Image (tube, rainbow, N blue to C red):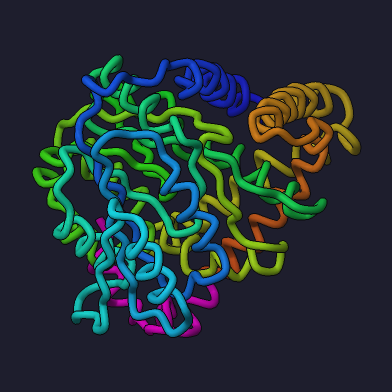
Amino acid sequence: MALFWVGYGLRVAYGAIQLPWVRDFPPAPDAECPRISILFAARDEEEKLPAALATLMEIDYPGLEIVAVDDRSKDATGRILDEFANTHTRLRVVHVDRLPEGWLGKPHGLQKAYEASSGEWLLFTDADVRFKPDVLRRAVSLVKGRKLDHLSLLGDLDMVGFWEKVLITFFGVGFHLGTNPAQVSNPRSSPYVGVGAFQLVRRSAYEASGTHKRLAMEVVEDMKLGKIVKQAGFRSDCGVAQDFVALRWHAGVGNLVRGVTKNFFAGAGYDLGRVTVMLAGLVLMNILPFAGVVFGHGWIRALSTIAVIIALSFHVGVAWVMRVSPLYALTHPLGAALFFYMLLRSTMVTLWQGGIVWRDTFYPLEELKRGVV
């Protein structure tokens, strides 16, 4: 356990410190701004959509195009989009009434948005994401400065109350340990990152990678977009946006647990062996060292202390970036226990149902397995 945190944890933490921050890049002038299309698919988002649309309309960027897909919504989502489009010429709305066989709703919606777009660069996002007005100009400076074809930005997640902060700050730790974002820019490495809130990709790279047609049955299509772009040989990177890109993920720990039911087992590729390793890792690396400090003796307590110090330091850094109290690092084993439960629950529910329900559509597990990229 100590070797894991010393040999791998410190390396990932050092890499995280070196990630580019979008705030450090000056806004690109008009002459250096390629045409960008912002693309998202919305289904039953009437509550969060107006605030997100308002920030999209305030983005300071020349020739910006926004393509929104109303994916079979049953609430006022379609009407809200049409009303915004009537008063904002940069917004175009595509209504999807039927989901073709062999597609998940969100990948299909994003594919339809791409087909209706014209930008040299495509920004894939979600219907509830809020942007600062100059984020695109700064992101353009970042991709030009680093000669990138694909950029994912880690934004702010709104957190309310103790349990959301426990869960989401640990998620930040787990995300870094699981993906190692600092290695995304290394073309000889395997790590990749795709963030649903902000993925800016050159149109030619997206098309050469296969578009969302390759991700038609991928639940974690955002991460897998980063994968196919990198595997196609294009330059990818991950940066920190902080409040330049913000969203409310799920309100309350109960909604967080339910909201990721379809995602966690999918993130493990529906592989029970991988799930077993992940569950063991959560316990061995994130819970037992704390028990070793309290109940261990001699060299067991000493090595456990090393592991705990590094884990807590890592968590403090994540909490600082997420702008919550560093004292939440002390909840590290509690967050790990919650994630253990969420991964186990996602696996068991998916197996029990024989698939997942997403956007009011049931998808059999065998079809989902065949669609894993």
> Where residue 58 sits: x, y (%)?
45, 43
* Span highlighted in magenta in the image: 348-373
Say which quadrant the C terminus sits in.
Answer: bottom left
In this view, 150 is above or below 305: below
Which residue reaches farthest front? Answer: 87
Name the residue rendered at 66%, 48% in the picture.
Answer: 158
Q: Tell how many labels.
A: 0
Closest to the observer, 307 or 62: 62
> Where residue 72 sits: x, y (%)?
34, 80
> Where residue 209 sits: x, y (%)?
14, 45
**Image quarter of residue 113:** bottom left
In this view, 211 is above or below 100: above
**Image quarter of residue 110:** bottom left
Residue 95 among magenta residues: no
Closest to the observer, 224 or 188: 224
Closest to the observer, 197 or 57: 57
Residue 367 among magenta residues: yes
Q: Is residue 9 left or right of residue 52?
A: right
Q: Is residue 93 left or right of residue 161?
A: left
Name the residue rendered at 39%, 34% in the picture.
Answer: 60
In this view, 317 is above or below 130: above
> Where residue 344 sits: x, y (%)?
59, 65
Say which quadrant the N terminus sits in.
Answer: top right
Q: Is residue 55 left or right of residue 33?
A: right
Name the residue rendered at 39%, 69% in the picture.
Answer: 83
Name the residue rendered at 29%, 77% in the picture.
Answer: 366
